[in-house]
Image: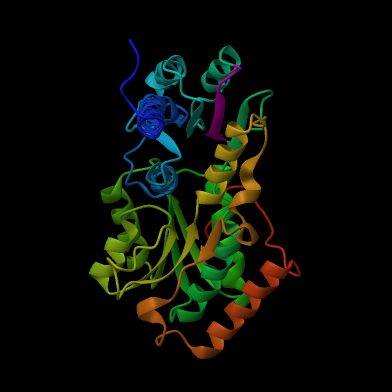
């Protein structure tokens, strides 16, 4: 039977049908395209609000909000469960697994060997392990030095209290950098150093800080949560670490050394997506020149810190960025003097 459509009508019908087919193809392809998002999992041994972990979580959430990745995480994971959770995420098809292997190095590295096609980016005191176990840490000793300068400059008693979690290299080098910065401004400054044996115990950190204040400290280095609370209650000053909490303590936290994890995460994601991920040390991405760390704005203390001190800090910051000054990395346990 011959068609009753004119040539012009047939052309219109065929064009309409082609458009429908194209739309259908896009509809079918959409789920497939969504599947190309990289699946990323993170494993944390503490709550995501803890300073160090919060920076990793923030960077991964940023990548998720950009639509680059699918992101899941586990927090408060016990060391005894860490290997099991790593394996679970590897089995679930995650292309990148981020975590903190400080207390579970052997187990974490064993999992990486068993899943050579999965990329692992782990906070670690050790070296990279070929072919797929990369390491990172918060190499923020540069802004820590600058905050030390500020601490000594605003201290009236010349006594600074320092409360840390554990005396491991990752903490020690920040404390030593802070102390060196303080000694540049006041060579006679005195330090009281204490470690609470926990990564997240604000009440214990607060008590340690109270003890230091009782001994004469008027500025406190808050490597752990809880220290700034003690300083606030006693009318003393505090220096922040990793994150900026001045919005919560506007009359207490003078300055902070900030860690920006985005450069580290973005570099790892790019390498996984292009198939170029290998065992590397990502520490370089935490340096100030890579925008992986910075000195937080003085904010509410902008007019309270002496202009002469601010000028010295800015000059030192410039020297760090142009490479004319290197902050010495010392990883031995710091001691009171």
Q: Quadrant of residue 222?
A: bottom left
* Percent x, y of residue 45: 38, 33
Tell whether 60 sits left or right of 185.
Answer: left
On the picture, is 301 further left or further right than 166? left
Q: Which residues are magenta?
A: 116-125
Task: Report x, y in % for residue 245.
Answer: 34, 63
Q: Is residue 164 left or right of residue 290?
A: left
Tell me if residue 115 comes above or below residue 142 in the rendering: above
Quarter of the image for residue 321 reads bottom right
Image coordinates for residue 235, horizontal then vertical, percent: 28, 74
Position above or below: 225 against 143:
above
User: What is the quadrant of the C terminus in the image?
Assistant: bottom right
Could you say which is closer to the camera, residue 78 or residue 92?
A: 92
Residue at figure coordinates x 34%, y 43% from the top left: 200
Quadrant containing the N terminus is top left
- Which one is nearer the viewer's eye here, 332 or 192? 332
């Amino acid at each position: 039977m011959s068609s009753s459509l004119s040539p012009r009508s047939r052309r219109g019908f065929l064009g309409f049908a082609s458009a429908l087919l194209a739309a259908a193809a896009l509809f079918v392809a959409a789920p497939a395209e969504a599947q190309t998002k990289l699946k990323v999992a993170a494993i944390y041994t503490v709550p995501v609000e803890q300073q160090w972990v919060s920076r990793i979580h923030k960077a991964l959430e940023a990548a998720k909000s950009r639509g680059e990745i699918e992101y899941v995480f586990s927090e408060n994971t016990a060391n005894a469960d860490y290997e099991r959770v790593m394996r679970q995420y590897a089995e679930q098809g995650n292309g990148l697994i981020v975590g903190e292997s400080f207390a579970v190095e052997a187990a974490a590295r064993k999992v990486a060997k068993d899943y050579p096609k999965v990329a692992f980016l782990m906070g670690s005191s050790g070296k990279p392990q070929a072919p797929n176990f990369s390491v990172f840490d918060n190499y923020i000793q540069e802004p820590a030095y600058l905050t030390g300068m500020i601490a000594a400059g605003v201290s009236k008693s010349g006594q600074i209290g320092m409360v840390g979690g554990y005396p491991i290299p990752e903490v020690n080098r920040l404390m030593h950098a802070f102390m060196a910065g303080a000694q540049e401004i006041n060579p006679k400054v005195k330090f009281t150093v204490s470690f609470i044996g926990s990564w997240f115990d604000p009440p214990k950190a607060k008590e340690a800080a109270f003890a230091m204040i009782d001994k004469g400290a008027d500025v406190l280095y808050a490597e752990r949560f809880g220290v700034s609370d003690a300083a606030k209650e006693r009318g003393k000053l505090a220096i922040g670490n990793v994150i900026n909490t001045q919005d919560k303590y506007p009359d207490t936290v003078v300055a902070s050394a900030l860690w920006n994890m985005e450069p580290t995460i973005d570099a790892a994601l790019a390498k996984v997506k292009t198939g170029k991920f290998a065992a590397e040390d990502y520490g370089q991405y935490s340096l100030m020149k890579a925008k992986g760390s910075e000195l937080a704005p003085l904010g509410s203390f902008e007019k309270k810190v002496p202009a002469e001190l601010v000028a010295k800090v800015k000059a030192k910051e410039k020297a760090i960025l142009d490479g004319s000054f290197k902050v010495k990395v010392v990883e031995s346990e710091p001691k009171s003097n």
